[in-house]
Image (cartoon, helix red, strand yellow):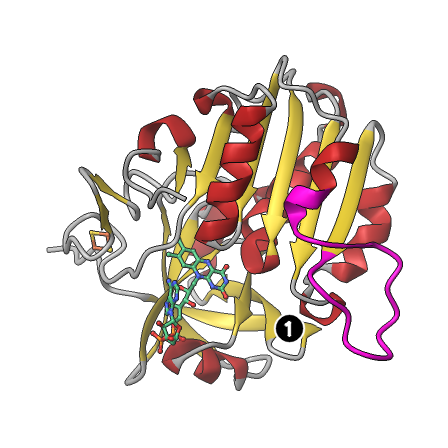
């Protein structure tokens, strides 16, 4: 009998340091055929495990076209701090992909507004790279990315490429700057970038990921400027155990974040995320 919760052995092929607490890991299933057959949609997540330590839900942070499974991990607790110690060639457990991805097919022909806070850029990087490759399939691309400080940003080595994507705009902001840190972007919350925003609601979708309080503010501001609830998509985080809709740990009203999400149309979850 097959066991859906059984992790498969994966090997760390490469590691990129994003900032003092965050690294991007390129992973490969030890079973070459399994790796070859593996595919996913940007926005889906994996369950990564270290034997004797535990499991954690981590978004896939690139696109299948790259042929590499990568995940960008901030070391915050038991599992993620141990993953931070891994080196190239080390192994870990991996199962997935799970959950819903961003509505990329439905967004074809539309303007795309991406709003990310902190680690929220990880599940959105695949969308940006997909649009860069399939540029003619989409309208204007606008990325608004905010972090606590410049030192907390991730994927900074890709910003130069993103600035050069045709018909696009990248706006960066931070809450504050530690003394001596160079910074040429804005200072303020992501919503402080809204007055300069180019995207208008007509024929547009907004994809939002970040701390839940930030997403609630952003969704509310987007509604104020005319976005409808079904044009806004949020990626939610809840404590996960099984990742496959069996244990109830991630329940949100009548929905399971692991199975029905993590990406939800705002319309479907608005009543269940805390009001401002
Ligand atoms: C769908 C999904 C995708 C995710 N993608 C990423 C990703 O791409 N990169 C990444 O770094 N993290 C991601 N996370 C968050 C990640 O799962 C948690 O940080 C992780 O579970 C921590 O595991 P741990 O054992 O290291 O921490 P623990 O030892 O379990 O906890 C350490 C601390 O972190 C807090 N914490 C743990 N999990 C969460 C959580 N889910 N939300 C808020 N606080 C939490 C705890 O309250 C505690 O204070 C994602 C979570 C979900 C649900
Ligand atoms: S994590 Fe078990 S039901 Fe979602």
Q: Secondary structure at mark 1?
A: strand
On the question of residue 70 being in view, the answer is: no
Q: Is 5 on the left-hand or right-hand side of 117?
A: left
Give the residue drawn at x 33%, y 46%. Answer: 274
The x and y percentages for residue 165 are 83, 36
Q: Is 74 on the left-hand or right-hand side of 230?
A: right
Q: Main secondary structure of the magenta part?
A: loop
Give the residue drawn at x 78%, y 44%. Answer: 171
- Name the image quarter holding the N terminus: bottom left
Q: Is 129 drawn above or below residue 121 in the view shown? A: above
The x and y percentages for residue 229 are 44, 23
Q: Is 245 drawn above or below residue 254 in the view shown? A: below
Residue located farthest toward the left when viewing the structure as drawn:
1
* Residue occupied by mark 1: 15
The x and y percentages for residue 131 are 69, 33
On the question of residue 9 being in view, the answer is: yes
Residue range of the region highlighted in magenta in the rendering:
174-192
């Amino acid at each position: 009998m097959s066991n859906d919760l059984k992790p498969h052995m994966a090997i760390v092929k490469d590691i990129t340091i994003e900032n003092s607490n965050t690294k991007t890991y390129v992973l490969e299933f030890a079973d070459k055929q399994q790796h070859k057959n593996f595919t996913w949609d940007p926005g889906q997540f994996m369950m990564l495990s270290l034997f004797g330590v535990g499991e954690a839900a981590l978004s896939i942070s690139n696109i299948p076209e790259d042929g590499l499974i990568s995940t960008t991990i901030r070391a915050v607790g038991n599992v993620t701090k141990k993953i931070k110690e891994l080196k190239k060639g080390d192994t870990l457990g991996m199962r997935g992909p799970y959950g819903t991805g961003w509505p990329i097919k439905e967004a074809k022909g539309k303007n795309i507004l991406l709003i990310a806070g902190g680690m929220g850029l990880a599940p959105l990087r695949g969308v940006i790279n997909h649009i860069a490759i399939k540029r003619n399939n989409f309208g204007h691309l606008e990325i608004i990315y905010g972090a606590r400080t410049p030192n907390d940003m991730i994927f900074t080595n890709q910003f130069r490429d993103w600035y050069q994507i045709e018909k696009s705009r990248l706006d960066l902001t931070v809450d504050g700057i530690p003394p001596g840190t160079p910074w040429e972007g804005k200072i303020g919350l992501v919503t402080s970038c809204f007055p300069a925003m180019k995207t208008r609601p007509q024929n547009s979708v907004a994809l939002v990921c970040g701390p839940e309080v930030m997403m609630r503010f952003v969704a509310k501001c987007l509604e104020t400027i005319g976005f409808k609830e079904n044009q806004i998509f949020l990626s939610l985080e809840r404590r996960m155990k099984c990742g496959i809709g069996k244990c109830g740990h991630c329940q949100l009203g009548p929905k399971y974040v692991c199975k029905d999400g993590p990406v939800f149309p705002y319309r479907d979850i608005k009543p269940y995320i805390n009001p401002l």
